[in-house]
Amino acid sequence: MENTYPKFTPEMKKTHKILIPNMAPIQFRILAAAMEQQGYTCELLGNCGSHVAENGLKYVHNDTCYPALLVIGQFLDALESGKYDLDHTALVITQTGGGCRASNYIHLLRKALERAGFGQIPVASLNFSGLEKDSGFPMTVVLLRQLLASIYYGDLLVALRAQTVPYELHKGDADAMLEKWLTIICGHIRAGRGYSNHEIRSAMPKMAADFATIPVHRTPKVKVGVVGEIYVKYSPLGNNDLEKFLESQNCEVNLPGLMGFVQYCCYNPSETAQLYGGSFFEKHLSGLILSYLSGTERVMIDALKQNGFHAPLPFKELTKLANGVIGHGNKMGEGWLLTAEMIELVRAGYENIICAQPFGCLPNHICGKGMVNRIRELYPTANITPIDYDPSATRVNQENRIKLMLAVGRERLEGGAKPAEFAPQPLEPEREALGV
């Protein structure tokens, strides 16, 4: 049976404006510049507030995943604003292709558009798994390289800003520096530059060195790590501006990079082949992709370290942190990566951790909330608080729970508690049996 929904066709590239949901504001701003360089007209949505969730609730069942409800609500709110020519507007949404409900957002969105009277609006899918073959963007090598560069640049800027803001002597210096480099990078990307390995290797050390010139006074702060479901973890709309709230509480925030999730998605196919059987190519494809990505990863890590900033572990090392704690076969949603990120944060001194999850998100409840006691057994100083985000969850209750967690962190800081020590863990049983 032929699909009857409106398709995003090549001709629409010249006639339609594409609206992009705002999940990771810094990374997606650079990503939008990459799409503009490829000839698309784009706008990164910034409409937030309770009315966005209320709009989503009108057209999406309240048991549906909270991120889907927010993304759909944000799109509908934008379309109802009167700002756009509805006959020349399209929407884009990502699909992971995994077992998470996120792969079905696009179908929920199309149903909501039809019910809201916007049935003529085409929805394009941005995915790497072959979904929506007839209604997506052609993924060229150039666009792929630009998208990867966008994420790496964005991750570096997020880390640099987060480690500077709490200590800056002149309020606003870090945000001004962030805006300066976003303007430079987006300008380069729009001009078809800035995404080659050589250009990235040249730019990243300059970015870190520039942030290192900001006058700071590094007094002890409560250090907080944020993990969780990918949308709620990064989106200010999804987590009620969690990063800004933590900064208002005089904390240093560590938000693990978006590239970690991309590497996790690349890692999993070969892990599946190793665990359940597959061809030699399937078992080693992920390794080839990750090896390519590791070059830029190393440049980013070195740029941070050489300029006095904390740097994350390489992904290859991050995978080892799950050993003996959770199997790598747990890969629905954020899966084992969520557990590994919590362990990495505790080891790095960010032992006050918020696990942000949509209410009812099974992968997060198992691999996040469900692993808290195990992590506390291994690292007794781990101070982890799972926070559910849902239309019925009030911001006041969420922030009060976070304040209780921060109170413990401040008490430990004043008492001079030492960061958790790392104890190497054995391989998980299933990999040991395979001799991997």
Image: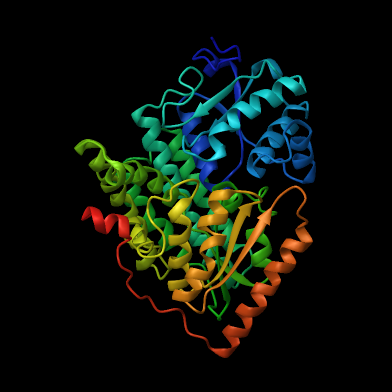
Number of dots carrying numbers: 0
Residue 414 visible to the viewer = yes
Is 325 or 266 nearer to us in this picture? 325
Residue 172 lies in what quarter of the image?
A: bottom right
Residue at left offset 72%, top offset 31%? 78
- Indicate the position of residue 430 as horizontal and vertical percent values: 31, 55
Taking the image as shown, residue 408 lies to the left or right of residue 266, namely right
Q: Residue at x 64, y 49 (%)?
A: 360
Q: Residue at x 38, y 50 (%)?
A: 329
Q: How is the image coloured?
A: rainbow
331 on left or right of 76:
left
Looking at the image, which residue is at 35% across and 67% down? 306
> Looking at the image, is 101 positioned above or below residue 295?
above
Q: Position of residue 75 (x, y in %)?
A: 68, 32
Quadrant showing the C terminus: bottom left
Could you tell me residue 275's position as x and y percent?
Answer: 30, 47
Tell me if 171 is positioned left or right of 99 in this view. right
Q: Position of residue 223 (x, y in %)?
A: 55, 72
